[in-house]
Image: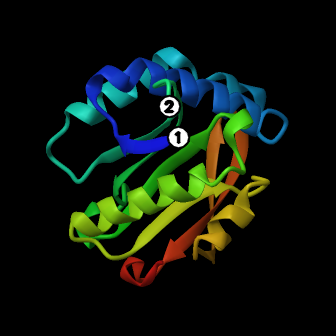
């Protein structure tokens, strides 16, 4: 297994991984309208546009098997709601269910932290579903749960998000 920066030709495989991992991770934890809205087609457009952008510190790393199959990814850049503050944001970190708990998430996180540092940012945050069962992972890589809760309304359903924060990425091992 290896972790590497994504290239535009990876977009279809990233989108497929995104849609599949989204369904297996959030089915039953979020309203169906939210889970079902994360399609391969929607993800393809998002990742294609994001990889073309040169106006911000966007990055995406993929986890792939020795045979070249993309089985996970992490993407991020400047914090989206206040990019002028110079805080990094991990937009997403997803692995197919069969490849979780093998150290790949940690390796994707470490590659992401290095990209944030290389972009001149030293802090990082990620927003996750409040009832996401994978929250202990963020603590295991040094994230600190923040007291703020964000609410999104999707299709008439309120979805609660919590954030994890890394004050100084350069101290991570």
Q: Provide the residue designation for mark 1.
A: 1
Name the spot of residue 83 as percent of width and height, x first. Answer: 28, 61
SS for dot 1: loop
Position of 72 relative to 127 (above/below):
above
Protein image colouring: rainbow
The reply to whether discs 2 and 1 touch (Cβ–Cβ < 8 Å) is: yes
Residue at screen point 79% across, 33% down:
27
Question: Seen in the image, is 81 located left or right of residue 65?
Answer: left
Residue at screen point 40% across, 77% down:
169
Q: Residues within 10 Å of mark 2 (few under 14, many from 20)?
A: few
Question: Seen in the image, is 98 located left or right of residue 52?
Answer: right
Position of 67 relative to 116 (above/below):
above
Res 34 seen here:
no
Question: Quick one: which residue is furthest to the right in this view?
Answer: 28
Residue at screen point 23% across, 54% down:
57
SS for dot 2: loop
Tell me where residue 144 sits by quadrant. bottom right
Question: Seen in the image, is 7 located left or right of residue 150?
Answer: left
Name the spot of residue 72 as percent of width and height, x first. Answer: 54, 37
Q: Nearer the viewer, residue 90 or 170?
A: 170
Position of 123 relative to 24 (above/below):
below
Question: Seen in the image, is 66 located left or right of residue 164?
Answer: left
Q: Which mark is first along the chain, 1 or 2?
A: 1
Name the spot of residue 48 as percent of width and height, x first. Answer: 31, 25
Question: Quick one: which residue is furthest to the front in this view?
Answer: 66
Res 143 seen here:
yes
Name the spot of residue 56 as percent of width and height, x first. Answer: 20, 51
Residue at screen point 72% across, 51% down:
101
Q: Provide the residue designation for mark 2.
A: 66
Q: CA distance from mark 2 to mark 1?
A: 5 Å
């Amino acid at each position: 297994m290896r972790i590497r920066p994504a290239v535009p030709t990876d977009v279809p495989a990233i989108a497929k991984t995104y849609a599949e991992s989204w369904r297996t991770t959030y089915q039953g934890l979020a309203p169906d309208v939210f889970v079902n809205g994360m399609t391969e087609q929607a993800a393809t457009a998002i990742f294609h546009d994001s990889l073309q952008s040169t106006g911000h510190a966007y990055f995406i790393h993929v986890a792939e098997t020795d045979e070249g199959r993309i089985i996970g990814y992490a993407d991020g850049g400047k914090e989206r709601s206040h990019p002028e503050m110079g805080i990094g944001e991990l937009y997403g970190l997803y692995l197919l269910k069969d490849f979780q708990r093998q150290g790949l998430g940690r390796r994707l996180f470490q590659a992401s932290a290095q990209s944030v540092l290389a972009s001149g940012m030293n802090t990082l945050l990620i927003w996750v579903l409040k009832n996401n069962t994978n929250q202990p992972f963020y603590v295991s890589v040094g994230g600190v749960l923040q007291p703020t809760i964000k609410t999104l309304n999707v299709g008439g359903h309120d979805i609660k998000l919590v954030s994890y924060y890394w004050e100084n990425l350069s101290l991570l091992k």
